[in-house]
Structure formats: C-alpha cells, structure tokens
Image (cartoon, helix red, strand yellow):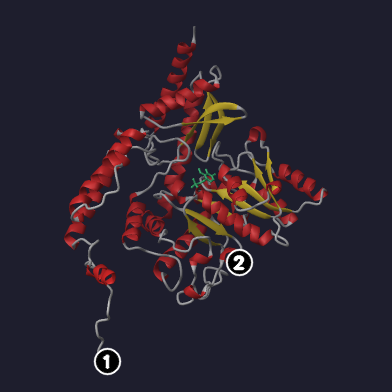
C-alpha cells in the first residue's frame, strides 16, 4: 500500500484542523439527561394547559429582555448552557403565543395536536430524517408515500391519487395550483382561474406572487350562502368564453375559514368536466372531516377534485407544520416540478410518478414540489394512524363537528344572541342583534385577553360577528357553556357601559 505523507498545510488550515471534531457534541448520558428535560418541560406544559391562558400576548420589551441580548459568543461548555437555555425558552417564549391545542382555543383554526404526533416529530427531527430523493432517503420517503396512501383511503379518494406533504395550506395550495397551471397553460400563458370572496386569502396571494396574470383571477361573490354555486361559476365561465378568454381552473373551498361552508363540489366537478377545467379544492381545514361519515356527506364530490389540499396540522391532530397536496392525475406533480441536475443523479430513483409505484416505488419527493431538502415530515402522521387507528381519529374529528352543533344550540337558547351561520364542519358564527360591530370586536378581544378562551371575530355580509371553531376533541361542553355565556355577558355589559 502506498504510504500517505502529511501534506504541507498553511497556518490557517492547520489551526482550523486543530479544532476538535466533537466540539458541538455532548456525551450520550448528557444528551439523555437533557433530552429528558425536554420531555419534562413538554409534558408539564401539556398537563397544565387547561389552567393557563388559551392565548397570551407579549410585549416586545419583556420578551426581548428574556430572550434577546448580544450574540452569545464564548459560552463555555455547551452542557451547562443547554439546560438553562431550554428553561428560558420554556418559561419565556412558549407561554406567549396562541395555544392552538388548548381546549378553549376557538379562534381562527385551532391545531389540537396529539402526543403520538409530537413523538413522531421528535424522532424525525432527532435523526435528521430526509425525504427528498429515493437514494438519499428511501425510509422516510416510504413513510411519506404510505401516509399519503393512508390519507387517500381515509378521505375516500380514488386509487392512483398521489401526493406530497408540505408545510401548510398556503404553500400546499400554491403547489397544487402550480401543477394546475402547468397542465392548463397554453403557449406560456395562464388561463382564467375562478375563486370566491370566501376563498382563503393566501390563495390569491399565491396565484399573484407566482405570476398568474391579475386579469385572469376572478373573485366571484357568494352572497349570504358564503359558498360558491356551480351556477355562479358557469355564468362567469360563459362570460369569459364570450369575450374570447380561456377558463382554466376553478378553486373550490371545502370548509371556508369564515363559516365552515362547503362550495358545491359536485356541481363544480360537473362544470369542470363539461368545460375541461381543473378543479382544485382547498380543504385545508375542512377536508379532514371526510374521514367521518357525516363529514363525507357534507363534502360530497371531494373525490372528484383534480387536486385537493388538506392540513393535518389543523384537523388531524398533528404538530405544526403539516399539509398535504393530493392530485388525482398521476404524474401531475412531477410534470410541474421535476428536475434532474447532474449533482442529484447519484441519488435519484428515476420515478416519474404514475401511481404510488413511480419507478418500482422509487419516488424522488423533491420532484413533487418546490422543496429540495425536505424533512421526514410524515413520521408524525404515520405514528398517529399507527397509534390511534383511523377509526379513533375519525371519532375525534366527529366530536369537533358535534361540539359546533352544541355551541349553536347554546346560542339559540340565549335570547340576546342569534346564529348568523349554523354549525358547519366545526364552525359556528353568531351575533347579538342589539349590539354594533365594535361591541362584538370588544367582546372577542376581552374574552381572549382574559385568557379563559380565545375566540375570533370576523365579518360576514358587512357585519362583525363572533366565530367559534370547535375542532379540538379535548373541548368539553362545559368549556363551550362558559365561552358562550361569557361572550353574552360581555356583550350585555358593553351595552350598559355604552349607555349615557
Ligand atoms: C381554508 C384554508 N385554506 C388555507 C389556509 C392556510 O393554511 P396555513 O395557515 O396552514 O398556511 C387556511 C388557514 O386557516 C384555511 O382555513
């Protein structure tokens, strides 16, 4: 064997190599001790959640005092600082946020995560799991492919549906719409895309920021149904055709953020089939309800979408972040996103989509969206299904649907309140007819500031209303009694305070 001799190195190189290779490492027993500290901090947080505020705002000065300061430079040995740093984050950063998993967090869209999901996330993070290329991450890739297939089955979508996990509904919807755009563009120009005034605002933002011509984005009114009808879209499509425009994509919502209402998915699917349009369904929050028989009924037609987005970090009990894009046309994602640079050739599996198989199942998930380096995001959902089973998950979703119906009944029983939109997929809106917009905003703000519960106000038909989203299965009927009762009392007190 040829003997290697020490190369001649300059001073700077030698000094850098004198740094020990384990300078960022901790001995295994220290890692174990500190890891257990994280478990303790998290379990204390979860076990004591009910007694703490559902949302705690923060002021910049206090938070900066606890968390800021100059860039730490020489901190001595890491083990000492690590425990103190963890305690500081747990004591100062963690409390100051909206606790989407709190049983009385009813604002916007809650995120009631499960402990199986938390553990799955930790395992993936701690092991630097990557689901990018087949050759560089066959294990985590398979977990993701399996989870997408489980989701497909649980939601009742057709066999052959493919998908990819993303960070959230905003990016997932853009991913699906880029695939739709790839399929429907002609000579490099986009066609017309139809949205509604209840479509989530991130979709118009996503369309415009990815270069969809503003003139090709139609926002259609939904009136007091707060849901898109096939007739409304048909009229807009025919009007565009009459002036020589090219309709291309319809965006339907399966569970709008404001009211939980569902667009006419079946009617829109018929219309899209008739005119050769791509039907995208944003089911970010509401789509997961299709895992239950009741939800499946409300979401009839969901299985006919060309693309669908759901957010397991909303209603499938996952820690942030987790969304899923599902496409009914195998290969549609790869057609839009595949790249094959020379520096990835060694790890690419060569799968071009075309069913879960790809090339004998060797799928490169980086070819299904704009993400290249992608963490093993599926572990948490895989572990959730494996731990609880789809039936228990469905029962937990169904409880959320029932809780909104209970909240509606409470509102109906209060003579000072009226239901504005009835319970739909875990959302109910209501108002006090005798109070103005400001009084409603103040009531929502006061209850949230009290910490007992967090609720939203929103605007429907030009009127400010109160809104509860009840998708946390840990919520009790007593939680809802207290929330609706407190809001009613705040509105009544506001009236007394406003009187001269
Ligand atoms: C219907 C709908 N679509 C999209 C989004 C955006 O999802 P994310 O916040 O995960 O980006 C939301 C968020 O609440 C939503 O309710």
Q: Disc 2 or 1, which lies upstream in sequence?
A: 1
Residue occupied by mark 2 = 335
Q: Position of residue 231 (x, y in %)?
A: 73, 43
Q: Which of the 4 image quarters holds residue 53? A: top left
Q: Residues within 10 Å of mark 2 (few under 14, many from 20)?
A: some
Label 2 element class: helix
Q: Is residue 193 visible?
A: yes
The CB of the residue at mark 1 lies under 8 Å from ligand 1? no
- Spatial distance from mark 2 to mark 1, Cα to Cα? 50 Å
Q: Position of residue 359 (x, y in %)?
A: 52, 75
Q: From what the image shows, is residue 285 above or below residue 187?
A: above
Q: Position of residue 192 (x, y in %)?
A: 71, 51
| Camera-side residue of 353 and 488 | 353
Residue lying furthest bottom: 1
Label 1 element class: loop
Residue contact between numbered discs 2 and 1, judged by CB atoms under 8 Å? no
Identified at 64% across, 61% down, the residue is 182
Q: From what the image shows, is residue 52 above or below residue 291?
A: above
Q: Residues within 10 Å of mark 1 (few under 14, many from 20)?
A: few
Identified at 40% across, 32% down, the residue is 477
Identified at 71% across, 47% down, the residue is 215
Is residue 21 left or right of 238 when viewed as pictured? left
Q: Position of residue 55 (x, y in %)?
A: 38, 34
Point out the image quarter for the N terminus.
bottom left
Residue occupied by mark 1 = 2
Q: Nearer the viewer, mark 2 or mark 1?
A: 1
Q: Which of the 4 image quarters holds residue 93? A: top left
């Amino acid at each position: 064997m040829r003997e290697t001799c020490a190369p001649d190195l300059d001073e700077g190189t030698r000094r850098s190599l004198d740094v020990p290779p384990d300078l960022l490492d901790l001995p295994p027993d220290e890692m174990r001790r500190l890891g257990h500290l994280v478990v303790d901090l998290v379990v204390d947080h979860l076990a004591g959640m009910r007694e703490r505020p559902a949302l705690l705002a923060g002021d910049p000065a206090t938070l900066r005092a606890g968390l800021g300061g100059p860039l730490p430079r020489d901190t001595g040995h890491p083990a000492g600082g690590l425990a103190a740093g963890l305690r500081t984050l747990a004591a100062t950063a963690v409390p100051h946020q909206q606790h989407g998993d709190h049983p009385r967090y009813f604002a916007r869209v809650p995120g009631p995560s499960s402990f199986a999901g938390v553990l799955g996330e930790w395992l993936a993070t701690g092991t630097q799991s990557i689901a990018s290329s087949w050759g560089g991450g066959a294990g985590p890739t398979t977990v993701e492919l399996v989870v997408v297939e489980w989701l497909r089955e649980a939601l009742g979508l057709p066999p052959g549906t493919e998908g990819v996990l993303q960070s959230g509904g905003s990016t997932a919807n853009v991913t699906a719409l880029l695939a739709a755009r790839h399929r429907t563009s002609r000579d490099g120009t986009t066609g017309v895309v139809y949205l509604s005034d209840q479509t989530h605002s991130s979709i118009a933002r996503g369309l415009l920021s990815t270069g969809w011509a503003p003139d090709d984005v139609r926002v259609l009114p939904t009136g007091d149904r707060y849901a898109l009808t096939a007739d409304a879209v048909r009229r807009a499509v025919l009007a565009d055709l009459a002036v020589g425009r090219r309709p291309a994509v319809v965006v339907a919502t399966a569970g709008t953020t404001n009211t939980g209402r569902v667009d006419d998915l079946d009617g829109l699917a018929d219309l899209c089939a008739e005119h050769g349009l791509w039907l995208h369904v944003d089911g970010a929050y509401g789509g997961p309800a299709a895992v239950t028989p009741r939800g499946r009924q409300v979401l009839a037609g969901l299985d006919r979408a060309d693309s669908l987005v759901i957010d397991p970090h909303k209603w499938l009990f996952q820690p942030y972040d987790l969304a899923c894009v599902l496409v009914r046309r195998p290969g549609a994602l790869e057609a839009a996103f595949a790249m094959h640079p020379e520096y990835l050739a060694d790890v690419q599996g060569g799968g071009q989509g075309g069913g879960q198989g790809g090339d004998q199942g060797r799928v490169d998930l980086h070819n299904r969206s704009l993400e290249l380096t992608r963490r093993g995001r599926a572990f948490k959902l895989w572990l959730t299904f494996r731990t609880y089973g789809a039936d228990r998950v469905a029962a937990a979703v169904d409880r959320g649907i029932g809780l909104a119906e209970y909240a509606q009944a409470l509102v109906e029983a209060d003579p000072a309140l009226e239901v504005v939109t009835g319970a739909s997929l875990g959302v109910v809106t209501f108002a006090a007819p005798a109070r103005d917009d400001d009084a409603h905003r103040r009531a929502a703000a006061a209850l949230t500031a009290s910490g007992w519960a967090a609720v939203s106000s929103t605007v429907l038909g030009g009127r400010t209303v109160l809104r509860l989203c009840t998708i946390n299965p840990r919520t009790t009927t007593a939680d809802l009694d207290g929330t609706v009762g407190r809001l009613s009392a705040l509105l009544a007190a506001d009236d007394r305070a406003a009187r001269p």
